[in-house]
């Protein structure tokens, strides 16, 4: 019999009761070091006092209004995001998938309004993840996402990850843009190099097409810059954002330049919940913390430290074949053991990492962590890999 809760997730046998800062507590009172942050969402950790206060204060005043009225908190959040980024304008959504949908529609509308009606296709990269809408799964093009859901929306040309020649070869008269994650998350914590991102910008410029970046996982401070593309000094046309932007409240955003958004006039797009007062209050509170002096420097320092410690762990454990990532978006590749087994083992030890593609154990800790949490995580990983190596040797 099907469970009342539709069984689409492979869930770990643990349920949490409450959480504070870097730690989560299960319904039996056991404590866990959170190195997953609910897929990188809890960027300021759990129960951050400023976020709790923003949510409670706004909850007393006004939760929701239709977007037929002005929402001052949203005007303020959009202005702050614009001031802090490449963008000139922002559309608020409730999730990453909706931010991607807005980005795809914006590319089509841009070319339509410029009189290039046939330019509707996007070049994307294999092992990407762009959310679970029909367009999102078509854009990622992975069989594990698309199988059984055909026919898929047309308009996506998937090339091998990081293959710049294939990108160039895929561009034709119908191509309207290129859409990539600067650092692939679900696909295995794989960064594109700065040179690759710069080349993508150049290819877009040469062809009069738009560069769309999916920064839903790697954005909002995760790599130590507000957006990951800033490391490459590249100016995108459109950026899809979600996850960390709401610090745990469902919030997404699609950021764009004035030119890229030139077709998005009254009546072309919308969302009932998108950008409602409750979400905007929390979003502003997240930015208060993230844009405060020193916050992103801390992320860079902690990210560097985590990568140094993971590299040392790789020296010690032959089971680790690669350390990947950028800032506090990190992965270790352990190809000889099912990733799910490693994650389950670490959960039993009191640490929460996650699975990513390509046999990678993924770590997306809250950005507020300190050195002691890195020590603790490395200790758990070291102990787990020591035991796996011993049982592998015994087989
Ligand atoms: C999570 C994610 C999405 C989808 O976001 P949802 O909020 O689950 O719809 C899209 N792209 C990337 C890179 C993601 O990590």
Image (spheres, rainbow, N blue to C red):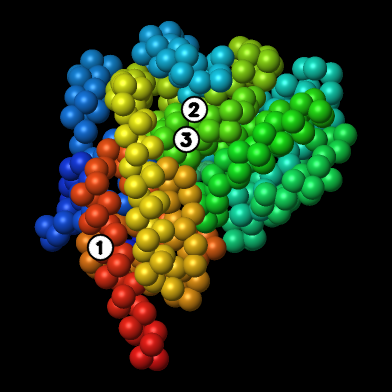
Choose the circle earlier in sequence order: 2 or 1.
2
Return the residue at label 3.
219
Q: Residue at x 20, y 19 (%)?
A: 57
Rendered view: 324 above or below 57? below
Quadrant of residue 348 within the rendered picture: bottom left
**Residue placed at 71% from the left, 36% from the top?**
199
Q: Nearer the viewer, mark 1 or mark 3?
A: 1
**Residue 230 sits above or below residue 339 on the image:** above
- Within 10 Å of disc 1 (Cα), the crowding (few <14, some 14-19, many 20+) is few
Q: Which mark is residue 379?
A: 1
**In the rendered image, which residue does mark 2 sit on?**
253
Task: State the SS at label 1.
Answer: helix
Residue lying furthest bottom in this view? 395
Residue closer to the observer: 114 or 224: 224
Find residue 375 and report its image quarter. Answer: bottom left
What residue lies at 40% left-to-right and 11% top-to-bottom?
A: 76
Gap in angstroms between the C-alphas marked 2 and 1: 37 Å
Mark 1 or mark 3, earlier in chain: 3
């Amino acid at each position: 019999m099907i469970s009342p809760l539709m069984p689409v997730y492979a869930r770990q046998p643990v349920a949490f009761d409450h959480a504070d800062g870097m730690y989560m507590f299960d319904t039996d009172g056991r404590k866990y070091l959170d190195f997953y942050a609910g897929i990188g969402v809890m960027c300021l950790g759990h129960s951050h006092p400023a976020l709790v206060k923003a949510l409670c204060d706004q909850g007393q005043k006004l939760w929701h209004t239709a977007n037929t009225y002005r929402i001052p908190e949203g005007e303020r959040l959009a202005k702050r995001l614009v001031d802090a980024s490449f963008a000139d304008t922002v559309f608020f959504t409730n999730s990453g998938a909706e931010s991607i949908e807005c980005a795809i529609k914006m590319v089509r509308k841009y070319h339509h309004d410029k009189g290039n009606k046939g330019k509707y296709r996007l070049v994307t990269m294999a092992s990407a993840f762009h959310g679970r809408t029909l367009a999102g799964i078509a854009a990622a093009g992975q069989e594990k996402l698309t199988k059984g859901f055909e026919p898929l929306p047309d308009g996506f040309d998937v090339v091998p990850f990081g293959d710049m020649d294939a990108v160039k070869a895929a561009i034709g008269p119908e191509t309207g843009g290129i859409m990539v994650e600067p650092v692939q998350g679900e696909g295995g914590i794989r960064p594109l190099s700065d040179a690759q991102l710069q080349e993508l910008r150049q290819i877009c410029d040469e062809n009069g097409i738009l560069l769309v970046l999916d920064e839903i996982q790697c954005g909002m401070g995760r790599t130590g810059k507000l957006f990951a593309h800033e490391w490459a000094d590249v100016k995108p046309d459109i950026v899809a954002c979600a996850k960390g932007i709401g610090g745990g409240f469902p919030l997404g955003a699609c950021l764009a330049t004035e030119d890229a958004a030139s077709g998005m006039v009254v009546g072309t797009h919308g969302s009932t919940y998108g950008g409602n007062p409750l979400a905007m209050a929390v979003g502003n509170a997240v930015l208060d913390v993230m844009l405060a002096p020193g916050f992103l420097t801390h992320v860079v320092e902690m990210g560097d430290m985590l990568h140094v410690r993971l590299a040392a762990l790789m020296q010690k454990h032959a089971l680790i074949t690669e350390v990947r990532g950028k800032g506090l978006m990190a992965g270790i590749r352990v190809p000889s053991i099912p990733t799910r087994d490693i994650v389950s083992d670490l959960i039993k030890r009191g640490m929460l990492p996650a699975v990513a593609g390509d046999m990678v154990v993924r770590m997306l800790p809250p950005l507020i962590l300190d050195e002691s949490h890195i020590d603790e995580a490395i200790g758990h990983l070291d102990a787990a890999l020591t035991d796996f190596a011993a049982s592998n040797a015994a087989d």
